[in-house]
Amino acid sequence: MPHRPRPYPSDLSDARWGLLEPTLTAWRAERRGKGLDIGRPPEHDLRRIMDGILYVDRTGIPWRYLPNDFAPRETVYEYFAAWQKDSVIDQLNGLLRRLVREAAGRDVEPSACVLDAQSIKSSANVPAAGQGLDAGKKTAGRKRHIGVYTAGPLLAVLVTAASVSDNVGGIHLLSGIAESHPRVAKAWADSDYRTKAIDHGATLGVDVDVTRGDPAQKDFRVIPRRWVVERTFGWPMHHRRLARDYESHPHRSEDMIKVAMVDLMSRRLARESTPNWRDS
């Protein structure tokens, strides 16, 4: 099926689609081999499906508002859910992260990471049981716990109620990072990551170093290492779907963050800029 013209800035270019297409077509072939085709008709163009997901992530619209020149909204969401369940979005993140590191002349696997958490308000879509209050930041909603390598791209993400402590989230992140990236031996975090996270890191062979700002410093100063993860939190904010948590399920919220990182890393590899409101 020929691809439609590119009326939306969020659409994949040929160069970016070339990075994603092998993983998505391999997934489709595997599902066919198991008799697990989804969607009717089964030959929906995968590029149009991915364009639809990126459009929702970038613009922040509800799925039911997806324009008709994409694949049907039910189909786009069904593929998004299937790609989340089958870890396809994780595979894309891993592939692009390795390519970004290779392009920078680095080993494909990182040896260090930075941890942090961000509390964010949630919408009425989020069940009350999945929300909480971050007493320190006075924010009601959810919390995004992330681990990144030292240049910023994502290694792990966990979405919880905002009441879950950074320490608890950090323990989960460290476990996931140690399993997926066994070369990681060093982690930096802020003072919210206390003894339990540090001790847990030690059991995994990861030295967790708490970095602190100077309490006597009154004006703004960049804190070494921690600025990297703060910048990563800023990157997805180009995607309006992530300006607030709109997802009913936390695993869907995690994958919306991962989709934003797929968008950002594929643009970096294709040497394309990310258009935003400043460009209008």
Image (tube, rainbow, N blue to C red):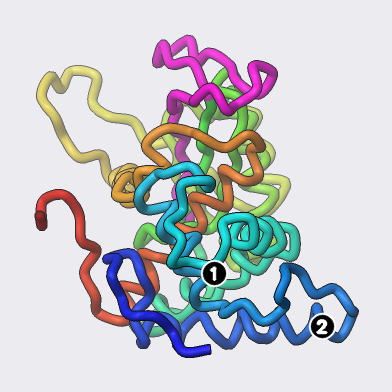
For residue 78, side relative to residue 110 (left or right): right
Q: Quadrant of residue 46?
A: bottom right
For the residue labelled by badge 1, is the local secondary structure a helix, a strand or a loop? helix
Compared to 232, does 47 lie above or below? below
* Residue 228 visible at all: no
Residue 44 quadrant = bottom right
Is 118 one of the magenta-colored residues?
yes
Q: Which residue lies furthest to the front in this view?
A: 68
Lower sequence index among marks 1 and 2: 2
**Local secondary structure at mark 2:** helix
Please name the residue that numbered disc 1 is placed on.
49
Q: Position of residue 221 (x, y in %)?
A: 16, 34
Viewer-nearest residue: 28 or 131: 28
**Residue 32: assigned label:** 2
Q: Is residue 276 visible?
A: yes
Disc 2 crowd rating (10 Å Cα; few below 14, some 14-19, many 20+) is few
